[in-house]
Image (cartoon, helix red, strand yellow):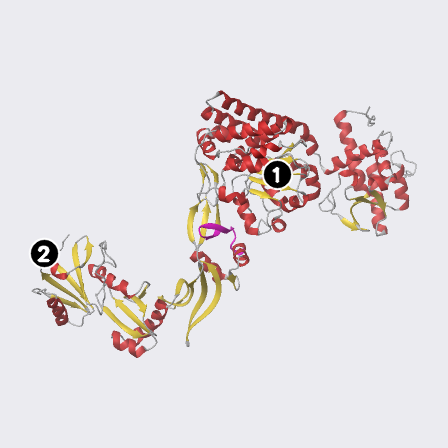
Amino acid sequence: MVLAGSEARIGVLIAGVESEEEAREILEDVGILVNDTVTARGKVIIININKELTTLGDPVRVETDNGTYILAYKDVDCPLMNTINSPIQGVVHGTRLALASQICLKLCGETEARLGDYIVRARQEAGDLVHACLFNPTTGEWREGTVHADDLNDIKSILGIGEGLAVELANLLRRLVSPFRQVQCLKWLVGNEEYCLESLTIREVNNGQVELWLERERRGGLERVFLARLPADVRIIHDEFLGQEFYTVYINDRLIIVSSDINDFANALKNRGFIIERLDREVQLAIEALAKRMKGYLMPGITDDGIVDPYGELDLNDYGVEGLVKAYEWVVKYYPEENRVRALANIALLIAKIVSPIVRKHNKTFVDFVVWNYGRGGEGKTTLVEYVLTPLLGVGGINEYVVIKGPVKRDTQFRNLVSLHRLPLILDEQDLKSLRENAGMIIATAVGMGTIGIHASKYGLGIGARFVNMRGVIVNTNVTFPAFLHEAISNTSDVALARRVLVINWSHESVDPTAFDDLPVVKPIMGAVNNVFRKYKSELMSSSDLIDLAVKIMVALAREYARADNERVVIEDYVKALENVRSEYEVEKPQLLEDDAEEFRNASYEFARKLGIQVRSWMDVVDALLNNSPQSGVELHGARYADETTAIQERVLKLLGVGPNEDFLTSPRVPSSIARALSEGRVKVYVRANALGVVPGGWRQWLGKTGTPYRGRRYYVLDLDEFLRVFVEGDEASREASGSNGELNEAS
């Protein structure tokens, strides 16, 4: 390296001079004697000199592997700044000459383009004046000057170039000094892939936005067509947990839009106030070109390596089981005994739901129950959320994605963000209206990975492709789970959903009012969970269901952190609470797993018994329903067409085993109410919404039928044979299971 003040043979490059004589004069003016050969390459002069470098003042030092070259300069033509402190490393464009000239080029403008053999840069001056620099790195040719960009004669004379090159340069200069930056060329000049005839350009505007324009070269000049106003920060992120790519928008580093489909992404942009004139190929190409591609995690939560927090919003400090102990002491002190167990179980289940998404991902048989906390109100469910569960998660500013009171906002993007999150989701204060709104999300989390196509349009999960949703959900509600199934769900299997729901029925007792004068200070559990997950991962991943996972996490926390006797007792009581909830669930599960037909049949038998009817077979039950229509809500009506009536009559007789030559009016196989209905042509059964307390309210499908308005109410309309099959086939199944002769004894 050559340092200032040393004696050496050095190369001095002077840009922006007309001749060797001018170069010599410049050097002599600063006291440098030129005593060696001068080489001219266009307007770039290289002179070998032997002189102390101190006479140059503060030179710009350009370092290469083969030596150090000093760049002298003439202020007017190439105003290189003499305040550059660090050297420029390496070779630009392949030659030392180009390396030195690159410094001059940078002063001509930030945007660089190629024009044939030239490197071109330019900067806007006053009016239509443009200062342009052309450099040929192969020959060392340098051309520089200030020109009127639209005056070909001016360009030719000042830069000393021919007509053809001047025309191409004029078009290039307009682009280089324009506030519009090319993001993609759509059409190149035939035979010249360095000259773009049609391109997508963007112009930066305020508030982190850019305008997208389509530019075309026309005979009359440049034509621009506005296409869109888009966010400047678009990212295409490959979420490493979900294994999917998502189009995203960040504002102030906060994720506000996410979609796996570019069409839905564009719609979300428009909903956020961005402008898209029409979503065509050009806009899609621009979004792809604008976007920064990266890998990572869209949302905080569990991964194979532990808990990630991409936005620094979680408290991942390891406080051990301190938060669990404080929560336990407060719950035991202020919750009534029956609900104390339910509260402790909820705490343990919430902790399990921190880990459950990764277990679901790898263990396909794992059941991540939706925790359904049912109570009439005032039992302390919301209190537990506010003062225990939320602090345990340490969620801070992202609480809106973790605890949602009432219906989830209809905004599709908010629903997407909620669905993509992997921390537990607590749906608090859910009445029937809220549950109807949130049904799609509840189903999504219950049914599992890769199944969200259902309810997408109705409930706004908003991503046009299959959407993976693996959040653990806790529901606090005053609606029983069967009522939710009846009122809020359609087009899905009640039984399939019921198998994935853990119902916890709270006793209607209130929290001690003095609890609110002694609120607990609960430290987050995330750091401790992160530690035990990493240490006991294989054991946790083999869990059969959420309760099993919760027990294993509690045992692991005890092993790692429970040093004092009271801490071990606390963990043991959490485990006992989980076992208690499991026992209650096993008792109630058969009722939850009843399908529509079984539930209606059982309710019908109960209805008949309450009327004091001796139930000997299903026929007595059917007679009870049809002979007491005002109370049962089951009515008989005629079909619209005669041939439909005949077809239904034939199917009924076949179902009941009545032969073609047998009189159904006197057949022992036909209930009297059915014989009468057949003779009168009343072969349509109208089942009123909410009948017997088990029929839905008319807003979801029941027995494959949709609720139909009739005389100001809603009914489910079945053919008579469909209605009878509920009882005939159910009776046969019952006989097969019990081995009876077909007669049912009245319950004693």
Q: Is residue 729 visible?
A: no
Answer left or right for 690 relative to 50: right
Screen quadrant of the C terminus: top right
- Name which residue type carries label 1: Val
Number of other residues with Cα within 10 Å of mark 2, as a class: few under 14, some 14 to 19, many 20 or more = few
- Alpha carbons under labels 1 and 2: distance apart: 81 Å
Q: Is residue 172 visible?
A: yes
- Name which residue type carries label 2: Ala
| Depicted 732 relative to depicted 105: above or below | above
x and y percentages locating residue 89 in the rendered image: 23, 53
Asked if residue 261 is among those painted magenta in the image, a careful observer would answer yes
Number of other residues with Cα within 10 Å of mark 1, as a class: few under 14, some 14 to 19, many 20 or more = many
Taking the view exactly as shown, the residue that stands out farthest to the bottom is 153
Residue designated by label 1:
475
**Does the CB distance between marks 1 and 2 fall below 8 Å?**
no
Picture quadrant of residue 534: top left
Q: Nearer the viewer, mark 1 or mark 2?
A: 1
Residue designated by label 2:
8
The segment highlighted magenta reads 247-263
Say which element carries label 1: strand
Answer left or right for 681 relative to 53: right
Asked if residue 107 is among those painted magenta in the image, a careful observer would answer no
Viewer-closest of 99 and 581: 581
Say which element carries label 2: loop
Q: Main secondary structure of the magenta part?
A: strand
Tell me which label, 1 or 2, sits earlier in the chain.
2
x and y percentages locating residue 448 in the rendered image: 57, 39
| Depicted 30 relative to depicted 363: above or below | below
Picture quadrant of residue 58: bottom left
Viewer-closest of 735 and 110: 110
x and y percentages locating residue 667 in the rendered image: 90, 35
